[in-house]
Image: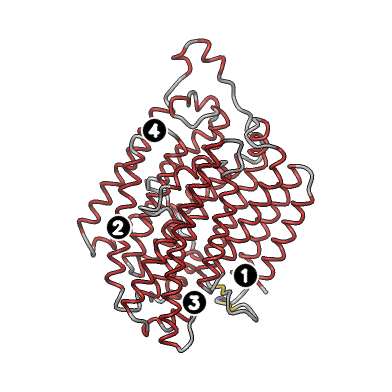
Amino acid sequence: MIILGYLAMGAIALALIALSKSHRTMNAFFIFHSFSFLAIGIYVLLTTTVPIFETGSEYFYVDHLSLYEVLIGALLFFLASVYANGYVESLMQAQELHRNNLKIFYMAFSLLLTTVTLAFFSDNLALFWIFAELTTVFSAALVAILSAKENIDAAIKYIFIASGAMLFSFIGLIFLYTLSGEVLGSGTLNWTILAKNAALLSPKMLTASFIFLFIGFAAKSGIFPFHTWLPDAHSKAPSAVSAILSGVLLNIGIYGILRIYAIVRQTQAEPMVSQFLLGFGLLTVAVAVLNMLLQKNLKMLIAFSSVEHMGILLLGIGIGTPLALFWTLFYILAHSLTKASLFFSAGILHRQYESNLIQDIKDVFSLQPIAGWGFIIGTFAIVGMPPFPIFSAKFFILLEAFGFSKSLVFAVLLLLVIASAAFARFLIEAFTQSSKDEGTDGMEALLPYTVRGGMKFPILSILFVILALGVFFPEPLEKLLNTIVYELGYM
């Protein structure tokens, strides 16, 4: 019944958007859609005994991990829908988004929210694979929606790399189905059944299946060497979309890796797969940080930062201890919120300067103080400075990694220092520039962009939440994360 509720609300919202004539009504119905998904998730978490197998279906399963991911996604979609009210209007005014494409934009956004939710609730790996592929299609449409050739190029590159890599995951599904059939008598791809019978699976075949599945899921999350689509797609997309791509879509691949690793760690394949994840995690962080160091484009800097943080999440999963998993789960929440706030701030700055390039950003605090301070505070949060939540998550993940490899910890710490330096260099160079240096003509050219209704609220609300999470760990959140760790078999 829960899945039917989500499907019903999604279908209603999609129909209302399709019948709408004005931007205001389309945006209102999308806000209704995202808020309804958030409300359903909160209601289920507070009033229902989880985990739940959907009545009459062996394909959907609601446990605390899937519900946690859905709640994060619904919250960010809700904030993005509020932000889009003013942001999309300014895109149309600047003729970057054609009014004829407005309905396509909101319908694709609505379909993306529904498919993301269904992906997280899928108990069947093949169904998860299908919904993950659909999220690629709908999110690529949102990247290509703007009236620019480079957006179409970025969307095509995104589809080609992500979907191409997912073909390898399909091979992994075949291996896993065949392997389960040999053990259970009939093949299955259901997470729950595979987890219960993991100890019976052949470690060698399971490792081979994991590697093929990893290729597709890693591409979805921007893990090296399948990350090359991410900087282009995230930087070229409208900022309301970029926030969702980074804060929600990347979590799908990480979610898939986490589910499969929970099965692998019950077998003798765990040590090899753990080293595999740690290696790719470190490489991903290194490649991202080196690309951030001399970055001149604001949104490209944030996009490469997303690659960096996916690498850290991979390290947390690869360490494989209950404490590492607990803080990896918390890291997912902290990163999703913080990265969304950075893209929302960057969207306002792009509207102000009609550019993301460092040399074009001037007089930030006099022209756009909310976006300027939002970006600065968001930067402090994303690089992991205390008291923000990413600090505590990084600290405890690295503390657990210290027992595995001291050299790994030192390498990661060095890379994190370089990442912080990259953000610091960009902030100092961009936010200290003044149009006075260019003379009177330059000053007259810089007029404040009027930030439309709803664009400030998501930034301020996220900054409040991440600051609160940095100084106070809510007991219900701690209980939820511990329950996820238990359900995945770590305790």
User: Residue sitting at 32 percent across and 57 percent down?
Assistant: 280
The CA distance from mark 1 to mark 2 is: 34 Å
Earlier in the chain: of badge 2 and badge 3, it is 3
Q: Kindly identify which residue carries mark 1.
A: 44
Q: Amino acid at mark 3?
A: Leu
Residue 213 is situated, as x and y percent measured from the top left of the image, at 42, 66
Q: Amino acid at mark 2?
A: Leu
Residue sitting nearer the eye, 173 or 222 = 173
Q: Kindly identify which residue carries mark 4.
A: 426
Residue sitting nearer the eye, 202 or 41 = 202
Q: Kindly identify which residue carries mark 2.
A: 398
The CA distance from mark 1 to mark 3 is: 26 Å
The CA distance from mark 4 to mark 3 is: 46 Å
Mark 4 or mark 3, whichever is nearer to me: 3
Q: Quadrant of residue 210?
A: bottom left
Q: Secondary structure at mark 2?
A: helix
Q: Secondary structure at mark 4?
A: helix
Earlier in the chain: of badge 1 and badge 2, it is 1
Q: Secondary structure at mark 3?
A: loop
Mark 4 or mark 2, whichever is nearer to me: 4
User: Residue sitting at 38 percent across and 45 percent down?
Assistant: 383
- Disc on res. 189: 3
Residue 158 is situated, as x and y percent measured from the top left of the image, at 49, 49
